[in-house]
Amino acid sequence: MSEPIPAPLPRQSADADGHRVPSERPGPPLWLLLELTYRCPLHCVFCYNPTDFSAIGRELETGEWLRVLAEARALGAVQLGLSGGEPLARDDLETIVAAAHRLGFYINLITSGVGLTEPRLRALKEAGLDHIQLSFQDSTRRMNDFLSSTRTFELKSRVAELIRKYRYPMVLNVVLHRLNIDHVEEILGMAERMGAEYVELANTQYYGWAWRNRGQLLPSREQLRRAEAATARFRERVGARMRVFFVVPDYFETRPKPCMNGLGRVFLGIAPDGVALPCQAARMLPGIAFPNVRDASIGSIWYDSPAFNRYRGEAWMKEPCRSCPERARDFGGCRCQAYLLTGDPDNADPVCDLSPHHHLVTEAVERAQQDGGEPSAGDLVFREYRAGPAREL
Amino acid sequence: MIQSLDSAARPAISAGFRLQWEPAQEAHVLLYPEGMVKLNRSAAAILTRCDGRRSIADIVADLERTYSAGDLTADVCAFVSLAVERHWLELSA
């Protein structure tokens, strides 16, 4: 989710103090993400899925997903992401893609590639799948297998070949962190050999399992500097043949990201159990009853539910955001990050150096310097399905 | 840039992009992975004619006829250049 849709801003007006308040209805949920399942054959330590996903209720059935698609499309949703977990774990993926295509969605499959056989890819192509984003854990088989805790590297190389054979652009996404960021040069070399056209080197965002493992995953400044330098050298060598995006971890920034372009403005996510979310990570936010598509229409959820109106406009903001000239650009940053770090989701995202809690971010970064970026994998918690709480490894 | 465009070149929407009418936005949009461009009417009028068969000269002639306009060559070439630069269009000779 690196490139938010450049969308028209919701119509807003200002109150007497100059604070913008939502007036008319917001724009439509242009970008729909279906997390079809939390099931996944991998066990990535940086996964943003909730750490208690094992306890989350039963997945929506095919007919329920198709109703979600039809209702969202009627409201104006047009970009569709199919994600998870591993979306290929659903054996009705082809049916869902075909229905979405008939409705006019632009469909992007976000996959680890596990389960993407040639017959399935052929069927997905025929069903109208527009685009595939393949995730890779690292370039070396050993590291890849370690970080995803399963032997998938060779499989992914085969999948990459299939993706090219079926004439999809080869788009790779690699999540970076302390344990693999020193391999950026090898990762890019591998991407080049695989014929990748786009590579996104996305530094880990600290939610879910990644939050749990933050102490082991946050890179040092020196590591980050070397990785950026390696990326720049690579770009210079390959020129326009490949496009490489390097997403800096926001912990190293002084201004927060405009998370989701503002909650409830363009993005609508549906979790495997039907819970509707204004951001994939938002179900962690306390005191908000997120509606379920089993109980309500997409239209009423998007426009009328308290959960989706909670962070629209600016009335919810506290200082320093409330009077900040940059509030219309970054919307105070990420509510989940504010909650995880400060305990109050209404606070400014502590990534911002205007936040009184910014020290919480800089202290975490400083601890990463002291560790020297040394891989210390012993304490990592691998994402896994369990009846009880996650096991500490 | 504009001068370098050959009016015999035939522009087509790039692979992986899709142009469609969106009733909810009352506009044509160009869709691509995780992104969308909402097009104004003149951009849409040009892009909907970029089918890989018609040359730039054909498109200019068609637009001049449709909108009873004077010479649109410079406007069309400027937009096509921009669209190629942004990877929305591919040119073939």
Image (spheres, coloured by chain):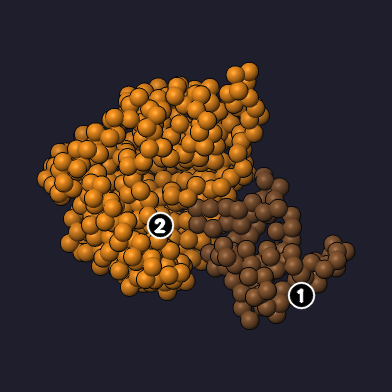
Q: Residue furthest right?
A: B68
Q: Are marks 1 and 2 on the same chain?
A: no
Q: Residue at x 31, y 59 (%)?
A: A229
Say few, some or many: other residues with alpha carbon within 10 Å of mark 1 (under 14 / 14 to 19 / 20 or more).
some
Q: Residue at x 40, y 29 (%)?
A: A354
Which residue type carries mark 1? Asp
Dot 1: element: helix
Dot 2: element: strand
Say few, some or many: other residues with alpha carbon within 10 Å of mark 2 (under 14 / 14 to 19 / 20 or more).
some
Q: Nearer the viewer, mark 1 or mark 2?
A: 2
Is residue A179 rendered to the left or right of residue A303?
left
| Residue sitting nearer the eye, A112 or A265 | A265
Q: Residue A266 location in percent, x, y? A: 54, 41
Alpha-carbon span between mark 1 and mark 2:
37 Å
Q: Residue at x 55, y 37 (%)?
A: A265
Q: Which mark is residue A235?
A: none
Q: Which mark is residue A245?
A: 2
Is residue A376 rendered to the left or right of residue A224?
left
Where does the C terminus of chain A fall, quadrant-wise? top left
Colour that chain A carries in the picture: orange
Q: Is residue A291 above or below residue A241?
A: above
Parent chain of label 1: B
Is residue B73 rendered to the left or right of residue A255?
right
Parent chain of label 2: A
Query: Is residue A386 visible in this depiction of the protein?
Result: no
Chain letter corresponding to the colour brown: B
Q: Which residue is mark 1?
A: B58
Q: Residue A146 location in percent, x, y? A: 18, 55
Q: Residue A183 location in percent, x, y? A: 24, 60
| Residue sitting nearer the eye, A257 or B20 | A257
Q: Residue B70 location in percent, x, y? A: 86, 66
